[in-house]
Amino acid sequence: MNKVFTLVVILNITSCNTNKTVTANTEEVQHLVINMLQWSNSENSIDLLPAVADTINGTYIKFDLESLRSNLSRLTETHYFSEKFINNYEHIILTLDRQLRNNELELGTWYVNEMPPFNFASEVSPWCLCQDNFEWDQIQVFHKSGNAYYWKWKIDSIDNDSWSEYSYSFNIEKHDNQWKISDLEGFRLNTIE
């Protein structure tokens, strides 16, 4: 009986500590996401699609791989993103580069000054899957389970009811005692292949 009581007490303490951790992490994660979104909207951000144009026919023909390497370094330097996220972004650009070079884009040629004919960074920002946004400090982060989270606009800051249903999912990982973004909904390769 004494062992069972001890086990129950330990489980309750562990459960309480886990809940406190999730709450504290949600606040940390919210701060991380707001900073990342503000960065993505700043001059310090990266050129998501460093495409190279053929000036004669007015089409994009490949991606600038040197600019891609620079983007990867800059993503690392922010300390917002995990290696998994950075590798995924690289994979997206290399996949699109291959498709451009081989004329394999499903929706056809990508003309200069036109929207990209693929489902990444076309019409909406992959950082938020939105064209317009409120102030980034007007988001609220919610915990789903494990390392899965989502954010929504704070309802009281929204004038348009259609935004109240909007949410954006992402995952995080902890590296060297720091939370980093490992996945963003707008950066999922399966949406472009």
Image (tube, helix red, strand yellow):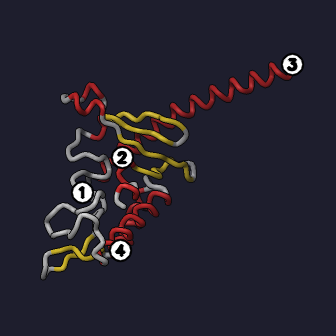
Q: Residue at x 22, y 63 (%)?
A: 116
Of the numbered discs 4 and 1, the one sitting upstream in the chain is 4
Q: Earlier in the sequence, mark 2 or mark 1?
A: 2
What's the amino acid at mark 4?
Arg
According to the picture, the residue beneath numbered tag 2 turns out to be 35
Above or below, comparing residue 115 to residue 4 in the picture: below
Q: In terms of secondary structure, where does tag 3 sit?
A: helix
Q: CA distance from mark 2 to mark 3?
A: 49 Å
Q: Secondary structure at mark 1?
A: loop
The tag on residue 98 is 4
Relative depth, front residue between 120 and 50: 120
- Residue at 51% across, 33% down: 24
Residue at image position (49%, 60%) is 83
Q: Nearer the viewer, mark 3 or mark 4?
A: 4
Rendering quarter of residue 120:
bottom left
Q: Nearer the viewer, residue 108 or 146?
A: 108
Residue tagged by mark 3?
2
Which-is-in-front pick, marks 2 and 1? 1
Dot 2 alpha-carbon crowd within 10 angstroms: few under 14, some 14 to 19, many 20 or more: some
> Label 1, on which residue?
122
Instruction: Categorize mark 1 by other alpha carbons within 10 Å: few (<14), some (14-19), many (20+).
Output: some
Which of the pair 40/49 is nearer the observer? 49
Amino acid type, label 2: Asn
Q: List x then y, in percent, for residue 186.
A: 35, 51
| Circle nearer the N terminus (4, 2) | 2
The amino acid type, in three-letter code, at marker 1 is Ser
Q: What's the residue type where badge 3 is placed? A: Asn
